[in-house]
Image: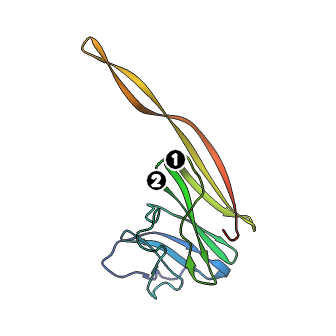
Amino acid sequence: TWTPAQRITNDNVADDMPQWVAPNGHPVLVWRQGGTWVYDSVPGNGPDPVFPAEQPHTTPSIIYGQTMGADAAIVFPDETSEGGDLFASFYDSGSGLWSLPIQLTDGGENPSSISTAYDGTDLLVCYKRTIFNRSTVNLPDGGGTIQVHDVPSIGQRDIRLLRYSLGYD
């Protein structure tokens, strides 16, 4: 049977996007509190920030949590100079801390439809990659034409699989 819902947060700060991970079977809740990603291994004791303040790629709009035996990961898309790419941060149950983000893709993969799994050895990340083609388009303009450069259009869309072996980087 289900228990009644328990309130985990109770303040004037907006809370959203909760994700559970359970390294070694111990639940850790990760969620966005205001604009900051936080976590609490015993919900209700007060969250800690996942990332140190003002680091690159530490304000994703969404995350995906994955338990990996004794540890855990969060995977998220974020913008780079090349476009959208995938990043991950890893939770070390020994220290109770998250790593700084590690970039998993490079080159504007524009990932979406992200799914994660753990196969006992590797973190698996499956996602849809969308290529955006850019071209010059001629538009009619009162008897003449205007050239508009760098017009994006959706190109090939594929499902991709990443395997990330855990270890010391």
Q: Quadrant of residue 124?
A: bottom right
Residue 110 badge? 1
Q: On the rendered structure, is 54 left or right of 129?
A: left
The quarter of the picture where residue 99 lies is: bottom right
Judge the density around disc 2: few (<14), some (14-19), many (≥20) Cα neighbours within 10 Å: some
Per the image, label 2 sits on a secondary structure element best described as strand
Residue occupying the point 54% across, 50% down: 111
- The answer to whether mark 2 and mark 1 are in CB contact below 8 A is no
In the picture, measured across the screen, residue 26 lies left or right of residue 57, that is right
Front residue of 62 and 168: 168
Give the camera-side residue of 112 and 56. Answer: 56
- Quadrant, the C terminus: bottom right
Which is nearer the N-term, disc 2 or disc 1? 2
Image spot of residue 92 (x, y percent):
62, 78
Callout 1, which amino acid? Asn
Q: What percent of the width, then of the height, locates residue 4?
A: 48, 82
Q: What mark, if any, has residue 79 been given in the picture?
A: 2
Quarter of the image holding residue 27? bottom right
